Amino acid sequence: MEKVNAIGRRKAAVARVYLTEGNGSIIIDKRPIDVYFPSSILQYVVKQPLNTLEVADKYDIVAHLDGGGYKGQAEALRLAIARALVKVNPEDKAALRKEGFMTRDAREVERKKPGRPKARKRFQFSKR
């Protein structure tokens, strides 16, 4: 098996993933996952597709992350890993879709409007 690549997006974050056969190491921007994501919750989010298919120690993952915050980056990486696993074995798509890992979460931050403090919030109304 050669390198399989996939892309995942969430909010402003973009994740590019390169999947190869190996022993389960995850390297993000030349750093191991436990250094890049110190939070165990975010590490769990990233590894969810691998744990669902029980292939966590079968593939090596090299990822490049850009933009967004740490939560968006973790979820973008999860989507990219799921897409790469489906490229390797298309029969796994149903199991990943059932868990919701194949769906791109399209929610974005709404832009701020002029003359308002935030996107929808208004300044306090004063009758007099």
Image (spheres, rainbow, N blue to C red):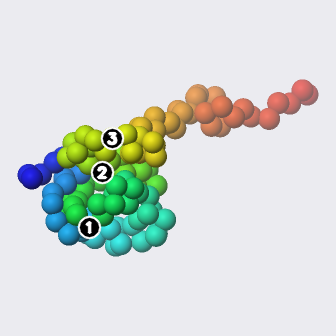
Q: Nearer the viewer, residue 70 or 104?
A: 104
Which of the marked residues, 3 or 1, is nearer the chain's N terminus?
1
Q: Quadrant of residue 62?
A: bottom left
Which of the marked residues, 1 or 2, is nearer the chain's N terminus?
1
Residue drawn at 41 percent across, 40 percent down: 97
Q: Could you tell me residue 31's position as x and y percent?
A: 26, 69
Asked whether, in this view, residue 50 is left or right of residue 120, the answer is left
Marks 3 and 1, how far apart in space?
19 Å
Marks 2 and 3, how far apart in space?
12 Å
Badge 3 local density, few (<14 within 10 Å), some, or many (20+)? some
Residue drawn at 86 percent across, 30 percent down: 126
Q: Could you tell me residue 119's position as x and y percent?
A: 61, 33
Mark nearest the camera among 2 and 3 is 3
To which residue does mark 1 refer?
57
Amino acid bearing label 3: Lys
User: In the orientation shown, which residue stands out farthest toward the right?
Assistant: 128
The circle drawn on residue 93 is: 3
Q: How many marks?
A: 3
Q: Nearer the viewer, residue 20 or 8?
A: 20
Note whether 68 is above or below 31 in the view shown: above
Amino acid bearing label 2: Ile
Amino acid bearing label 1: Asp
